[in-house]
Image: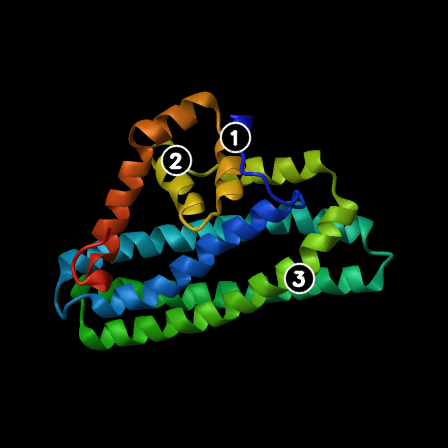
Amino acid sequence: MSSSRTPGPARPYTHEMVVVHRVFRRESALLPRLVRAVPDGDTQRAAVVGAHLTEYVTGLHHHHTVEDETIWPLLRERADAVAAGADVVVRMEEQHARIDRTLSEVSAQAPAWRLTADRSAATELARVLEEHRAALLEHLDDEERLVLPLVEQHLSVAEWDAVGRRGLETVPRDKLMLALGSLLEDADPQERAYFLDKAPLIGRLLWRAFGRRQYAAACRALRAPLHGGTRQ
């Protein structure tokens, strides 16, 4: 697969986190729109969007738990002598706590809306989702600007790879193609080649055989109301 790589400037080994962050940026932008697009009283459609929302909340919580348990302790240990590094870790932890609060509010609002698909409940849920997104974007921007350079200074490639493997632990086997598709959707050719090269051979074969079609179909089904009923 190495021949499939598109020539381009070398990227730091932490760049894969930027691609992961794109998934959360994209989905956090789509979710309020998807909620608002559910017709008043359409509980069947609310169940579809609600299931996606649950997966988003679970995925983001796991992503941040991995950082809390792996990256922050290593940076605190190794960058603590650098005041700026210690301050950054504190800032990240505070931002995670703020995001957790917004996710708790989302989780509190979602069940009533999912049960009734009531228009007023949808408006309130969309509002708290937008508040969540504002907190999330501040954190992702700071993490890419402040944390990833520290990681490159203080964590080895092997340690960073271990973080990535930990991040995949909770992805169900039947969701692996969807998870891969979500990463590749907004990736450039070099990024796509990188993630496909990291996948085992069977994973690459399954992606070509049916995974990309499965992901495209899932996107059409979820996002159709945002695209006049179809998604190409």
Give residue 163's position: percent from left, percent from top. 61, 40
Question: Of the residues shown, which amino acid type is indicated by label 1?
Answer: Asp
Q: Which residue is mark 2?
A: 176
Task: Look at 56% across and 69% down and name the residue there.
Answer: 138
Q: Give the percent coordinates (x, y) of residue 118.
A: 18, 71
Sequence order check, earlier mark of 1 and 3: 3
Which residue sits furthest left? Answer: 41
**Left or right: where 47 falls relative to 29:** left
Looking at the rendered structure, the kind of residue marked 3 is Arg
Element under disc 1 = helix
Query: Mark 3 = which residue?
Result: 145
Q: Nearer the viewer, residue 24 or 44?
A: 24
- Helix, strand or loop at disc 2? helix
Describe residue 169's horizontal placement relative to residue 164 as left or right.
left
Vertical relation: 43 (above or below) 218? below
Task: Please name the residue shown 52% across and 49% down the image.
Answer: 19
Dot 1: within a 10 Å radius of its alpha carbon, few (fewer than 14), some, or many (20 or more) residues? some
| Residue 143 locus on image (x, y percent) | 63, 59
Q: Is residue 223 left or right of residue 76?
A: left
Colouring chosen for the image of the structure: rainbow
Q: Label 1, on which residue?
A: 197
Tell me residue 42's x, y (percent): 13, 63
Cα distance in 3D space between marks 2 and 1: 15 Å
Label 3 or label 2, whichever comes before in sequence order: 3
Does the CB distance between marks 2 and 1 fall below 8 Å? no
Asked if residue 90 is positioned above or below residue 55 in the image, the reply reads: below
Name the mark nearer the viewer: 1 or 3.
1
Q: Secondary structure at mark 3?
A: helix
